[in-house]
Image (spheres, helix red, strand yellow):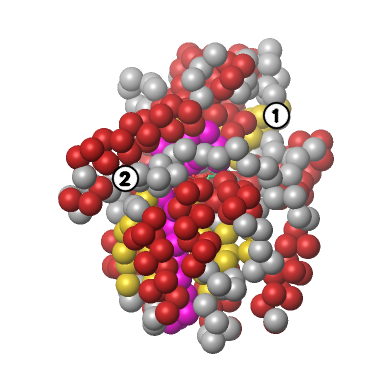
Amino acid sequence: MSGAELAALLDRHGFDFFTGVPCSLVETLITALERRRRDPYVAAVREDAAVGLAAGAWLGGRRPVVVMQNSGLGTSLNALASLSLMYGFPALLIVTWRGFAGQDAPEHLLMGEISPSLLDLLRIPHRILGSDSADELLAWARREMDAREAPVAILVPPGVVATGASDGVVADGAASARRADRDAAENRRTGAAGSDPEILHGVISRQEALAVAVKELGDAPVIHANGYVCRESFATADRPQNFYMIGSMGLAAAIGLGLALVRPARASVVFDGDGNLLMGLGTLAMVGSLGPQNFVHLVFDNEVYGSTGGQASPSREVRLDRLARGAGYRTATAVTTPPAIAAALRSALGTRGPHFILVKVTAVEATVPRIPHPPAVIRDRFRRALRA
Ligand SMILES: Cc1ncc(C[n+]2csc(CCOP(=O)(O)OP(=O)(O)O)c2C)c(N)n1
């Protein structure tokens, strides 16, 4: 079924508040929900924040839906247990089933295997979406959540909701990339990127920015955020000093901070994404309070969740470098051009930090493969490279 059809059914069954964190399996559903004239989808920075938003919306009289990948079920366990289930806050959880039948990238396999059991353990009633069962399932979900005053879940296996291409919907990623391209051209024309400190959008792609940054790294270790940051960096230059964090969205900065604290004589660099940073925003305060001088945090901010189809991220309106400065990083700069990126990274690697470099980039995504190395290989060669 198409995402638009599912969105229309949700509407018909009385669901009227939508939030979540994107997954590519429901890209077209989120596109349709973002386009609702009344109460469009609210982009949450974490799945547990989405569960909180849904509780607030229910208190305000709505029947909420939280869209999440099953990895986000892990992120929101405590919110589900000690908020939704304890107080009795109804919500429909639309949980995509990555790792279904053991067929997926390594980061999804274990969670894929245990997703139904996790829901069982939480005593959250759940059903599996099939292409012709949506109407009936949504009627069930509404009945159950209203009667129990508790969350219910619908698991969405791959292929049930059509992807952008087969749906006839312009994939939002492509739309965002085109919008970002137009913005970039406009920025170049008006000089907006440099002249108004409040407005800063990318003028080059992340892969172009990565190519510049990688040249400055020397042998510095780099922890990569999940998604396309990993893949494009791998395609630019695979290095043993690259740790590709292929799952665990939001944790790259925490891993880099841990490394910085125990290896103070060597730089610890993080290549982060805006969605990743926003999912683990509290880590900024840890960096600010602990103040590791060897910590260099680059955020490639394309203003979207590019890896899952280009849904808008709050970073379009929020200057992440200012958050870092407020959290206590010693320096926080924002750059858009190749010479500025090179100069900022060179300076950060040669001076006392912690440093934060916001690299504003367009949403253009390179066609690059998944990381081919198995997780244990990534881990072991990185550890060896650190000892060298
Ligand atoms: C807990 C969790 N929720 C959702 C996802 C799905 N997911 C993978 S990458 C990604 C987007 C990351 O955004 P950002 O850091 O801005 O990088 P970009 O995709 O734009 O390159 C999402 C939502 C996930 N892997 N884990």
Amino acid residing under circle 2: His
| Foreground of the two, 208 or 48 | 208
Residue 363 location (% of width, % of height): 44, 39
* Residue wearing tag 2: 201
How would you rate the neighbour count of disc 2 (Cα within 10 Å): few for under 14, some for 14-19, many for 20 or more?
many
Mark 1–mark 2 Cα distance, whole angstroms, equals 34 Å
Asked if 13 appears above or below 232 in the picture, the reply is: above
Give SS at disc 1. loop
Tell me if residue 4 comes above or below residue 46 in the rendering. above
Q: Secondary structure at mark 2?
A: loop
Relative side of 164 to 388, left or right? left
Using the rendered view, name the quadrant where residue 119 is placed. top right
Is residue 309 located in the magenta-colored stretch of the structure? yes
Tell me, yes or no, whether the highlighted magenta stretch contains residue 301: yes
Point out the image quarter for the N terminus. top right
Residue 295 position within the rendered picture, expressed as x and y whole percent measured from the top left: 47, 75
The reply, left or right, for residue 341 in relation to residue 231 is: left
Question: Does residue 309 show up?
Answer: yes
Instruction: Give the residues in magenta.
Output: 291-313
Front position in the image: 209 or 41: 209
Q: Residue 86, can we see it?
A: no
Q: Residue at x 55, y 82 (%)?
A: 266
Q: Position of residue 49 (x, y in %)?
A: 45, 48
In terms of sequence position, does the residue under pointer 1 or pointer 2 come before the other?
1
Q: In the rendering, which numbered label is found on residue 158?
A: 1
Of tags 1 and 2, which is closer to the observer?
Answer: 2
